[in-house]
Amino acid sequence: MTKKDIVARGIHALYAQDPQRADWLLWGRRVDPVSRRGFLKKSGLLAMTAAVGAQIPFWENMPGGLIPAALAASPEPFVIPGREGLRVLNDRPINAETPAHLLDDKITPASRMFVRNNGIPPVEASVDPATWSLEVAGESCQNPMQFTIAELKARFAHHTYQLQIECGGNGRAEFNPPATGNQWSTGAVACPSFTGVRLRDVLEACGIKEDAVYVGYYGADTHLSGDPTKVVISRGVPMAKALRDETLIAWAMNGDDIPALNGYPLRLVAGGWPGSVSGKWLKKIVIRNKEHDGAKMTGHSYRVPCAPVAPGTEVPKENMCVIESMPVKSLITFPQSGITHPQADAFSVRGHAWAGDLTVEAVFVSIDFGATWQQAALTRPANPIAWQHWYAELRFPMKGYFEVWARAVDSQGRSQPMVLPAWNPRGYLNNACHRIAVKAV
Ligand SMILES: Nc1nc2c(c(=O)[nH]1)N[C@H]1C(S)=C(S)[C@@H](COP(=O)(O)O)O[C@H]1N2
Ligand SMILES: [Mo]
């Protein structure tokens, strides 16, 4: 890890990986282990300032090796304003996930929406929705065009859908051997309602050539390195997904502006696929005559081995396939894991289930580590690609420690696995059953 990494990866990742090296990088060699006297290096000060989210006026007085209390004092090192309770995984770029019990809402509010940034979002104050423009181009676009948000709103029909977005790496933390990247547990998923125009309507207005096979996006965020020529992320979807009714160019989330961290003022939403296809701070769309080859489309990014491999296998690029629709999954959002419950009383449990482009056919719950299962009540989705809600009432046969497991099955009969699914080099697609701990007393 180099100085550049401090700035690029942020203080949390740095301390998590190697605290001594982090100390050295932030404070330099001159930290005396007894007096803790040392001098904060410039790169260290930069990283700390970014991490605490404010200037540190008296930084010259900080004892050597000190980790700011804002970062050290609590298990939640810092809080994203307006998203209290989210677990922050990294501060540069910002990545934060939502604990399962905070995802209980049927429609995820902005305050509980996870954040997955690959780069630095545009500075909020510099974003002017009145002048923001969206360009549509690419070799398979007949008439390249530009639209302001007002033009999009005036020219095309508005649609609102509740759409589930889940990061391809959600659940990564459980893979072994571990995969690098954000160690998401279960909380990189959400299902807000989005309003915008259909991507299809906009593409058709610009003319889709016969040879079109893929659509790619570009956003206004900037690369962590500060290099303006580097693209943070530019992914996309095949035409069939791009042309679906529910694939939107959205300007609103839950009836309000899209939050700054989630793509204000305009984002693509292609729900049910890895979240990385839903481009934020959307500036440009390209219609391609081949599979889009933008940043993080190629190599090992958002790809899994085309055929299963043994854990730890090094897989050559040619054998990696792009992730499309996400696998069936569910969450227990009520009650919170770790609760105590009177054994004589019925136990109500509920959550959501989703299955990429498919629907969820059934959800089952178990209190005996999967030996027997009881079917839960399940709602229909509000619209295709919205998550569904399930509910069950259980009884514990005796006092003691129980785990409640939930398992969803999709409309093609595929079930969530009870343990980890296929290992893959980057730790994607972990759709293992979610479980909570309950003490019956
Ligand atoms: N421009 C841009 N779009 C982006 C990203 C990004 O870093 N930059 N991250 C992607 C990834 S990996 C995910 S999982 C989703 C996360 O959306 P959210 O932060 O609104 O939850 O946005 C996607 N769109
Ligand atoms: Mo993601």
Image (cartoon, rainbow, N blue to C red):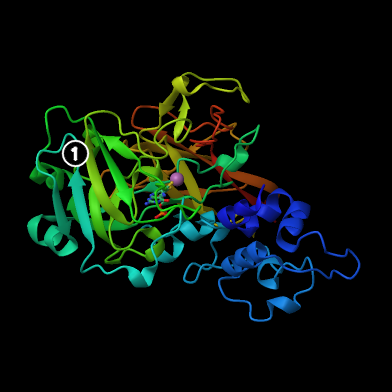
> Is 220 positioned to the left or the right of 82 in the image?
left
Q: Of residues 156 and 93, which is closer to you in this image? A: 93
Q: Secondary structure beneath disc 1? A: loop
Label 1 is placed on what type of residue? Answer: Leu
Q: Which quadrant, please, contains the C terminus?
A: bottom right
The quarter holding residue 260 reads: bottom left
Q: Of residues 171 and 287, which is closer to you in this image? A: 287
Which residue is pictured at 82% across the width and 63% down the height?
Answer: 30
Q: Could one spot residue 398 in this view of the protein?
A: no
* Residue 369 percent coordinates (x, y): 62, 36
Q: Of residues 379 and 111, which is closer to you in this image? A: 111
Q: Does any atom of ligand 1 lie closer than 8 Å to the CB of label 1? A: no
The quarter holding residue 211 reads: top left
Which residue is pictured at 9% across the width and 61% down the height?
Answer: 154
Q: Of residues 57 and 298, which is closer to you in this image? A: 57
The residue sitting at the right extreme is 34
In the displayed structure, 423 sits above or below 80; it is above
* Residue 82 percent coordinates (x, y): 46, 71
Which residue is pictured at 33% across the width and 52% down the height?
Answer: 219
In the displayed structure, 241 sits above or below 71; it is above
Residue density around tag 1, few if under 14, some if 14–19, many if 20 or more, within 10 Å? some
Q: Which residue is mark 1?
A: 243
* Residue 73 percent coordinates (x, y): 71, 69
Which residue is pictured at 39% across the width and 49% down the height?
Answer: 229
